Amino acid sequence: MQSLRMIEDWPVPNAAAAVVRGADGAVLGAHGPQQHLFPLASVTKLLTSYAVLVAVEEGVFELDDPAGPEGSTVRHLLAHTSGLAFDEHRVMGAPGTRRLYSNAGFDVLAGALTAASGIEFGRYAAEAVFEPLGMHSTLINTAHRSPAGAGGLSTVADLALFAAELQAPKLLDPSTVRAATREVAFPGTSGVLPGFGHRRPNDWGLGFEIRGDKSPHWTGTTSSPQTFGHFGQSGTFLWVDPAAGVACVALTDRDFGPWAAELWPPFTDAVLADLPS
């Protein structure tokens, strides 16, 4: 896929990318150092969310179990509607009323899983998700960093395996993944999409942002409304476009900024246009 060569022109020290087909998990194209270890920032939230969903299916806790501020549940925390502030354990609103994107909420979420399972969150994620998928370079370090973002490290090669799982689940029932990635949690909820401003509505699933009709957006102008995923402050993203039947992972080591908002959408459009017929 020649489109992936566009990352060579990104103003970043290092970049790597891959495109993964949903039907069979085949890597259609890859460019850059596939085994280079990158900080994921908030792309970590996708891994955290998947571990939480595994815990739900294993009966560790339920989506509607209380977690976080009064009236909040595991579901609220996953959907950024718990009412917690962005980076503080401070209540800013009633649960379910606003889409308050919250790193603090994911910290609480990881703590709730640890408390319910008796297993440290990073170890639970490794045993539930990374090891079964063969993601041997991926880790979430919760000892000194947050499961919301700063603690996640991975490679494009590992995240390509995760992207394949998202499209053809083996660790979760497909209906669970569909509900988390294709069904809007707390529909109609408005809030800020970090880096892009206020959105009405700001559609989100259970840990996964749903593109919907948001514009501008970090995915492409030709991305389907069903596209879901996440980007990270470290200049990283993972999206899945169910209409196109592919996922794309791109990791860099330069913080998100105007360069990314300018270059990522045309890159995604080029990837979608470059898919084999």
Image (cartoon, rainbow, N blue to C red):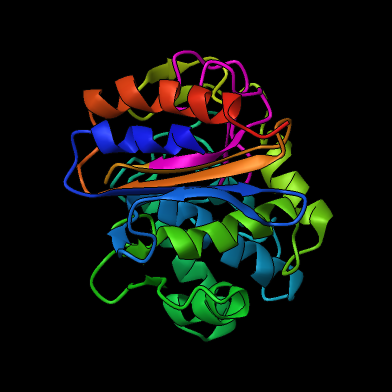
Q: Residue 196's quadrant in the figure?
A: top left
Between 158 and 84, the one lying in front of the other is 158
Q: Residue at x 52, y 53 (%)?
A: 46
Where is 230 relative to 166, above or below?
Answer: above
Compared across the picture, whether 136 is left or right of 261 comes to: right
Q: Quadrant of residue 209?
A: top right
240 vs 166: above or below: above
Where residue 216 appears, x then y in whole percent? 44, 14
Q: Confirm whether the magenta stretch covers residue 242.
A: no
* Residue 210 belongs to magenta span: yes
Expressed as whole percent of the image width and height from the top left, the position of residue 35 reads 36, 66
Q: Residue at x 55, y 80 (%)?
A: 131
Q: Residue at x 45, y 69 (%)?
A: 111
Q: Is any part of residue 132 visible from this angle?
A: yes
Q: Residue at the bottom extreme?
A: 118
- The answer to which of 95 and 233 lies nearer the viewer is 233
Find residue 66 and report its image quarter.
bottom right
Q: Is the residue 227 above or below the residue 86 in the image?
A: above
Query: Which is nearer the eye, 260 or 267?
Result: 267
Question: Which span of residues is magenta-colored?
Answer: 203-231
User: Which residue is rendered at x = 28% and y = 77% of the image?
Assistant: 143
Is residue 80 visible in the rendered image? The answer is: no
